[in-house]
Amino acid sequence: MAAITGTAALNEQLRSLCLGSFPCGTKGSRNKSSLESGKSLYSDTYWENEDPEEETLDMLQELLTCSRSPWGLEDSWSCEAQQLRQLAVQSPELITNQLIYSHFRSLRVVDKEVTSVDEQLLNFINLEELVLSANKITNASSSSLPQTLKVLELGSNQISTLKDLTVNPPPKLQHLGLAYNRIQHPSESKYFTEEFWPNLVSLDLSFNDLTDIFDLVPNLCSLQHLRILVLQGNPLTFIPAYRGFTIDSLPLLFALDDVPILPDERHQFSGLLNQKGALEKSAMVLVNIGKLRGIPNPTNFLEAQDPGEYPIITYNYYVSYEFIEQETSKEVEHVQTAVPIFSKTVKHPPGTLSSLLPQTPFHTGAYKTSEVPWLDVIDTGYNRKHEVRDLLALKSFLLSGMMVTVTEEKTYCWPVDHNKTAVPKSAKKGEKEKDKGRPSSKGSKAGTKTKNKKENLDEFQRDPPILKTLGFAHVNLDSLVSGEMSVSTICNLEMCSTEPEKQPIVIDKEGKKSKDRKKSGRESVDTHKNSASSAGKTKTKVTSEISPTEEQQVPPEPVPLTLEIQIQIIRLSSASEAQLKHGKLEGFIHKPECK
């Protein structure tokens, strides 16, 4: 695809004004008689004496402004576009290239696939506002910009360096917009000083990849006129001292990230600049997992089990989640989940915040809560603080979101085979151990064993647990990148299949298969029913009439599987908090103002 310059896109927009065509210019039907006879367009004549094929001046101007007119064009790309069209109706002979270049004070070239800014923009000698957002500009040179500019907007492009933009920048510039670009390297901070922007009032660097707040802000201190600063969306905003350090370093700042700076807030962070060396450069993220609801009761899927039968089945549940993992971290738990954990760059739907920003590959690990038995409402009470040093990777992770899963851990417990594991001991003591492990034929002993069986599961042999994912959900964390401090939500987990699994063969206390015993029991019941069928026909008929009503009862709807979760970016609330955290008991020394 051929490169598109800024001037080429502007010329296309100028042609859309149709300054030389009807109803503008000298080719309109209303000029037929007036131009030939030399009459003024404002001559006072009766409409009966006019040519019906000609339009009045008011009619022509109405064609330019009426929303239903085919000649009504969108003029949002410049405030002066409509004025120029009206001038082309009133005095078409005045429309020249020189007039056009000197007429415009503001120009917007948005989403026009522009790749470069060429020197022909210098022809707009009175231009004060230039907006080149949502294009594909990789480098903007100040040599191509009019020196009269006061507002320059270059947001949503592909700019990664300001080297060429600061060669000879417009000296009167008051606003510089560089949001949604690819400015990342710490060395770019040196271009935000008074040497290049002596009159800068507003600076928008949001949603870039700047990571070092302690290098950027000292350079901004030289901008004496800076009052509005936007840094949200940069990885450096994840640092706990981000807002406090910025406010304390820039005493003349009015607003940070579109939030006004009040005197109370400035007082709270007073003195934080003096603690620069002790402030953390890592992000601290707190994950809280609360109550889990809607897990089906596992006993509903099991057949009734006699007290003396084995195995004993236990059910435990836990919540697992993925989180960014440091390469040197040794604390990551090896958790088996339905979500693959690997280094990745996530693709996002077009139009979302995640799709607009460049992604950095990151590696995640799985973390989980403690295993707990089934309850109607399981309060996990889980909280964990994650320290992340790679701020770029953290930003990409938050944009991709966090996967959460609920897992069931099913375990079969069997009696220990003492014939293989017993250690030779004294005869009397050995007999007691054997009697303890051997099934007893006496009802009282069997009952005692059954009663204490579940209380002493630690003495049983356990099979490897069978893991089953009950539900999963994706937690959207975009708002943490946009400046929010926390995300609190109740996740509606997508439930997986809850079909009952095939149960193992159950063994009773005498070592026999309970399947055969239960089968013989059913046969005796069937025999009893057949023998009494002739005597109870009337009773059976009544039962058959009642059973359809019972079958028509609608089962209760399953409770949705929900989970309370909160993810919070930890921030310092005051300078005293940072002082106490690092054990500094001496008073603050008042800092000098930035000059």
Image: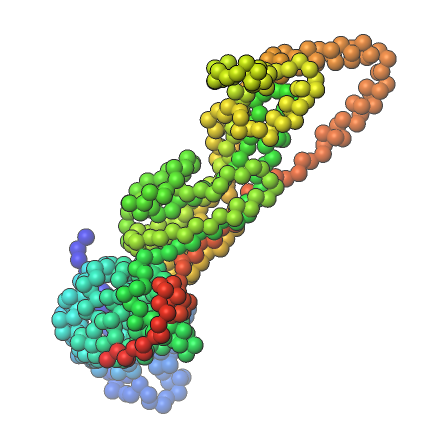
For this orientation, the residue located farthest to the bottom is 44
Number of disc labels: 0
Residue 32, quarter of the rendered image: bottom left
In the image, 531 versus 102, the foreground residue is 531
Residue 43, quarter of the rendered image: bottom left
Looking at the image, residue 438 lies above or below residue 321? above
Question: Residue, x 50% and y 38% (percent of image)?
Answer: 371
Looking at the image, residue 311 lies above or below residue 300? above
Q: Is residue 379 visible?
A: yes
In the image, 477 versus 140, the foreground residue is 477
In the image, 90 versus 343, the foreground residue is 343
Looking at the image, residue 407 lies above or below residue 105? above
**In the displayed structure image, the side of residue 538 where residue 122 appears, left or right:** left
Question: Residue, x 74% and y 30% (percent of image)?
Answer: 550
Residue 187, quarter of the rendered image: bottom left
- Looking at the rendered image, the quarter that the C terminus falls into is bottom left
**In the displayed structure image, the side of residue 191 where residue 90 appears, left or right:** right
Question: Residue, x 66% and y 13% (percent of image)?
Answer: 441
Residue 505: % across, % down: 56, 17
Q: Is residue 26 visible?
A: no
Residue 439: % across, % down: 61, 15
